[in-house]
Image (cartoon, rainbow, N blue to C red):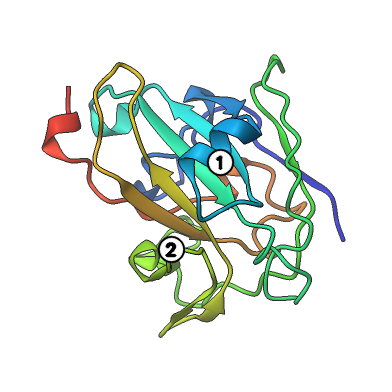
């Protein structure tokens, strides 16, 4: 296993495809939900570790919104089978770093990205609509173009300022190929396709 560090807080690289509009690492604050809160929020994920990524602004959308982005990591499917991220948890957080939050991951084998994917978009193109095919327990789904791929499911839940948002789900296939020592920036490694925000979130 290779330990890698991604995310410098330096902002979104200019070469990144438009599909990565929500990836703005230097606009994100991180906090961890305590286990007692976790049980109340997600009854179907009793063993997972839940991290919240608080997005305060999405400048590339031209809108300001305060959304809570949750990564749900279920130890049952982050296994040692070679098709998922072995020992992907824990994720080490350093949100006090002058350069922004830095995460250290220990990846599994993941798999390779399809040859037709735009390299600037990285993982964005091959996870289109993946969330709609992820079952409620977060297990690996079949993709007709990719095959069995490990997914980390992301959900946009309640906003901070008292208003509620409709649940919007995203999924990201994670691959050792892209989370490697040759990919220095988190933004370059974890691009994903997005669903346009509902009109009632545009402020």
Residue 39 — which label?
Answer: 1
Q: Any mark on residue 161, and which?
A: none
Callout 1: few (<14), some (14-19), or many (20+) C-alpha neighbours within 10 Å? some
In the image, taking residue 100 as reference, residue 80 lies left or right, namely right
Front position in the image: 77 or 180: 77
Horizontally, is 194 left or right of 23 in the view?
left
- Residue picked out by circle 2: 136
Is the C terminus in the top left, top right, bottom left or bottom right quadrant?
top left
The answer for how far apart the CA atoms under marks 2 and 1 are is 16 Å
The residue positioned 73% from the left and 41% from the top of the image is 91
160 is higher (above) or lower (below) than 183: above
Q: Name the quadrant containing residue 130.
A: bottom left
Residue 150: where, in percent of width, then height?
58, 68
Judging depth in this view, the residue of 181 and 97 nearest the camera is: 97
Drawn side of residue 121 relative to residue 100, left or right: left
Q: Where is residue 95 in the image (x, y as percent from the top left)?
A: 67, 21
């Amino acid at each position: 296993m290779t330990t890698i560090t991604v995310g410098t807080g330096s902002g979104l690289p200019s070469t990144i495809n438009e599909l990565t509009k929500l990836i703005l690492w230097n606009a994100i604050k991180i906090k961890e939900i305590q286990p007692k809160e976790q049980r109340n929020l997600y009854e179907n994920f009793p063993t997972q570790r839940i991290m919240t990524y608080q997005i305060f602004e999405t400048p590339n959308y031209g809108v300001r919104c305060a959304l809570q982005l949750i990564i749900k990591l279920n130890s049952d499917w982050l296994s040692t089978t070679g098709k998922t991220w072995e020992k992907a948890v824990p994720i080490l957080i350093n949100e006090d770093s002058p350069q922004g939050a830095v995460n250290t991951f220990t990846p599994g084998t993941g798999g390779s990205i399809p040859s037709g994917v735009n390299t600037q978009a990285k993982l964005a193109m091959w996870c289109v609509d993946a969330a709609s095919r992820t079952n409620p327990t977060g297990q690996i789904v079949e993709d007709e173009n990719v095959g069995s791929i490990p997914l980390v499911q992301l959900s946009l839940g309640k906003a901070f300022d008292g208003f509620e948002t409709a649940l919007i789900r995203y999924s990201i296939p994670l691959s050792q190929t892209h989370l490697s020592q040759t990919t220095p920036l988190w933004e370059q490694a974890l691009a994903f396709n997005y669903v346009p925000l509902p009109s009632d979130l545009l402020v």
